[in-house]
Amino acid sequence: MPDSLGVHRPDWRTTTSALLATALAIGAAAQRAPRDLEEHVRRVLPSKAEARWLEIPWQTNLMRARQLSQQQRKPMFIWLMDGHVLGCT
């Protein structure tokens, strides 16, 4: 119902109901949060097979990488880039 200025304001019952519903939703979410969080982390983090590239002995020194490549008789992969590290140029 509009007040004396013609503005419609919800009555106390509507406001109280909305606050109660929000509190119940937050309480329910808090009870299942640890289990859901662990499941979410498990799904988001890479598996052992997906993280295999982390085992590659990356070199940041080009001359040292060239030396190792020759010693081990393995090819050398060079990744060069110019610009912002996130590609935001």
Image: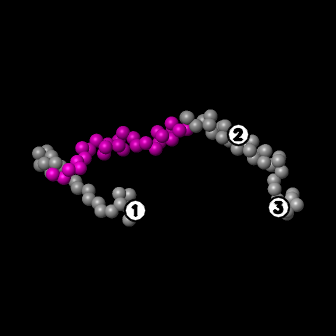
Taking depth in this image into account, of 85 and 70 the one nearest to the observer is 85
> Which residue is found at the position 35% from the left and 57% from the top?
85
Distance from disc 1 to disc 3, alpha carbons, whole Å, reads 47 Å
Q: Position of residue 33 (x, y in %)?
A: 58, 37
Q: What numbered label is drawn on residue 48?
A: none
Which kind of residue does numbered mark 2 sit on?
Leu
Which kind of residue does numbered mark 1 sit on?
Cys
* Tag 1 and tag 2, C-beta contact below 8 Å: no
* Residue where numbered disc 3 is placed: 7
Q: In which quarter of the image is residue 49?
A: top left
- In reply to whether residue 35 is colored magenta, the answer given is no
Q: What numbered label is drawn on residue 24?
A: 2
| 1 vs 3, front mark | 3
Q: How crowded is mark 3: few (under 14 residues within 10 Å), some or many (20 or more)?
A: few
Q: In which quadrant will I find the N terminus?
A: bottom right
Identify the mark nearer the N-term, 1 or 3. Answer: 3
| 1 vs 2, front mark | 1
> Disc 3 on helix, strand or loop?
loop
Q: Where is residue 69 in the image (x, y as percent from the top left)?
A: 15, 49
Identify the mark nearer the N-term, 2 or 3. Answer: 3
Q: Where is residue 52 in the image (x, y as percent from the top left)?
A: 32, 42
Q: What stretch is highlighted in magenta?
A: 36-63
* Residue where numbered disc 1 is placed: 88
> Which residue is found at the position 28% from the left and 41% from the top?
55
Relative to 9, 44 lies left or right: left
- In reply to whether residue 42 is colored magenta, the answer given is yes
